[in-house]
Image (spheres, grey):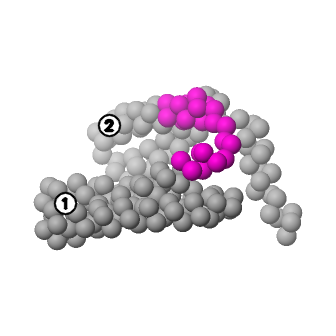
Amino acid sequence: SAASDVYKRQGCLLPLFLASGIFFLYILRDTGRQKMALLCTLGAFAGFVLTVSVCLKSMNGNVMALVVGTLVFSVVLALSTALLVHRYMVIRIEWVRMVLMPLISAGLTAGALFALTKAMTSLSVGFLALLISLIVGFLLYVFLLLFLRCIRKKDLVLSLIHISEPTRHA
């Protein structure tokens, strides 16, 4: 049915929200806020139970109610933990460099890949077109990130330092 297709497409968002929620749970736990992490998890679970019970009744027992409930659980978990991490941790975000410019880079890359794919579909090269699109998309996105200074030399050096620290202590 059409409603079932909508819920299946929404189910694709589950990994994104669930991974985000788990990531923020680990941050809360590792910073000594285990009780807050537990409260977020319990609140998300309560949202799951409530959503599934309401959806099961309104959907006449359709199993897609579980997808909707799990999506609600994931969204509540991700948002509540993210808000707590934002509240209790000092995180300085350079919105233009860290959010806006990568979004612009992604949009420009998507537009270029759309045009490239349109042009290559007329050539009917199939798998080769996909491979070329992937390579061009990756290179263009990395170039735009560097050109728009989303990634700075200082950031790369800090990343390398953090990567090499565990091997030094071993």
Looking at the rendered image, the quarter that the C terminus falls into is: bottom right
Few, some or many residues within 10 Å of mark 1 (<14, 14–19, 20+): some
Q: Amino acid at mark 2?
A: Lys
Mark in front: 1 vs 2: 1
Main SS, magenta region, reads helix
Point 22% across, 54% down: residue: 6
Which circle's residue, 1 or 2, is located before the other in the chain?
A: 1
Q: Specify start and end residues of the magenta stretch as a single range.
A: 83-104
Circle number at residue 167: none
The residue nearer to you, when weighing 50 against 103, is 50
Kind of residue at badge 1: Ser
The residue labelled by disc 2 is 118
In reply to whether residue 85 is colored magenta, the answer given is yes
Q: Is residue 96 above or below residue 3?
A: above
Element under disc 2: helix
- Give the residue displayed 27% in from the left and 66% down from the top: 52
Is 46 situated above or below 126? Answer: below
- Residue depicted at 64% across the width and 60% down the height: 33
The answer to whether residue 9 shows anywhere in this view is yes
Q: Quadrant of the N terminus?
A: bottom left
Mark 1 lies on residue: 4
Picture coordinates of residue 131 (x, y %)? 45, 50
Where does the image place residue 137, in percent across and percent down from the top left? 49, 41
Q: Is residue 168 above or below residue 127?
A: below
